[in-house]
Amino acid sequence: MIKRTRCLLLTVVMLLMAGLVSGCFGGGSDATGTIEGQLLYREDPDEVVTRGLAARTAESSIKVVPRLQIEPVPPQGYRFLEDARVVLEGTGRVAKTGKDGSFVITGVSAGRADLAITHQSFPGVLRGWVDVQANRTTRLTDDHFAKVHYVLIGVGSYQDRSLAGPTNDVELMRETFCAAASEANTHSVKTLIDANATTWQISKAISSVGEAMENRERDFLVLYFSGHGDNDVLVAYDGVLSDVFLKNEIIDAGIYNAAIIIDTCASGSMVDGFGVRSGSTKAKAAVPRYLSTLPGSLNGYPTRYTVLAASEANQPAWEKEFTNGWHGVFTYHLVEALKDEITDRNRDGLVSAKEAYDRVRRLLSDPDQVGGSSYTQNVVLWGAGDTVLGRIER
């Protein structure tokens, strides 16, 4: 099969960067408490009743209330949700709801506890977090859970060296992450393709997400980019997005939680600690501003950032023709990994960024996927490895 790289010659990138300001991305106690809650669902699954969650049916149909606050008989129009899985992320601990929809998790370390709720009857994952207090019980409500906003970007139509895969990549990611949720009004989905993926449109999309976030310390951005790239830059339709540009856009928009997924050549350079390079210079920037210096807190609230990149700095990222059309090999195998039970190594029914990274990195070690034995394409993970990217249907 024909394979092509997602790189541009550095001279081309530098021409695109003319006039752009250089820069780069920046970015226990034994005390325990208890978490408890009760889950209900609407008998009419099309009616949205919650304030947030991550994908359509589950997020728009399941309601979270403090445990045993309601009567033994659920309110009219609701039923108790039995056998839902409540996962304490990063620990492998799972609680199941009983016949009355209630659950209790004891012995939870004090501090931030990230949760994910799934049920076999509802696609999607409800994600959120709570601040666990030592020797106290935290009672969950809808307000503990997050709305997820997606910005999916694909650029294949360049004046020089077009790509066949980015448009298909965006559609594949849309189907994987949020196709079932696109009609729900508990989150937003924005796709930017080719001429619509200008630097201004991308900046506007990110700032719009920040403006739409009602529960800022919990709401979540998934930012995906497929196209050309080079060291410390992604190539939009009309110019480049430097690492410092993206970092500042996220901070200025007040986005505290984000997963950034990049399928371009040299995409790992966005978090490798170097500034925008001039020619072949590898000297570290005098002031580190790269994505890996995204702050650990904003306005007193903890942040959670994850970056998953298709290749290391100076490595190509390949695209090729699969049975369902042209795709970036990273994107194609990431989607496959999110569906494969093998990826879920701790068997909690969820796929974390670290589990996806491990699986895709192994898949891309096959020379047939990356242009032959003369090439390598090593996936890069930075930040919160336990961020949930998907769920496994068993």
Image (cartoon, helix red, strand yellow):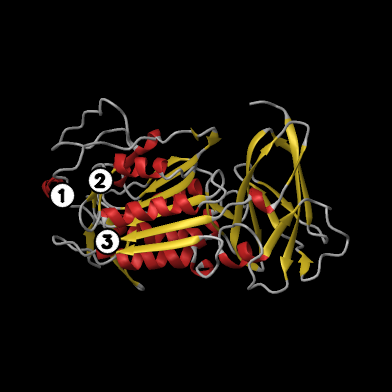
Q: Which residue is drawn at 72% across and 66% down?
A: 41
Q: Is residue 201 visible?
A: yes
Q: In which quarter of the image is residue 45?
A: bottom right
Q: In this view, does 97 lie to the left or right of 254?
A: right
Which corner quadrant holds the N terminus? bottom left
Q: Looking at numbered disc 1 in the image, what kind of residue is underneath it?
A: Leu
Residue 186, how many percent across, how many down?
56, 61
User: Which sits earlier in the primary sequence, circle 2 or circle 3?
Assistant: 3
Residue 356 seen by the camera: no
Local secondary structure at mark 2: strand
Do tag 2 and tag 1 residues touch (Cβ < 8 Å)? yes
Q: Is label 1 in a helix, a strand or a loop? A: helix
* Residue hosting label 1: 16
Q: Residue at x 64, y 45 (%)?
A: 92
Residue ID for mark 3: 155
Q: Where is residue 99, by image quadrant?
A: bottom right
- Pointer 2: what residue? 233
Residue 383, placed above or below residue 5: above
Q: Do the residues labelled 2 and 3 touch (CB within 8 Å)?
A: no
Q: Which of marks 2 and 1 is in front?
A: 1
Above or below residue 10? Residue 64 is below
Q: Where is residue 321 in the image (x, y as percent from the top left)?
A: 29, 69
Q: Position of residue 247 (x, y in %)?
A: 36, 41
- 195 displayed left or right of 364: left
Which one is in front, 141 or 102?
A: 141
**Lower sequence index among marks 2 and 1:** 1
- C-alpha distance separating marks 3 and 1: 15 Å
Q: Judge by depth and name the residue closer to the eye, 211 or 230.
A: 211
Tell me if mark 2 has few (under 14), some (14-19) or many (20+) residues whose alpha carbon lies within 10 angstroms of its own. many
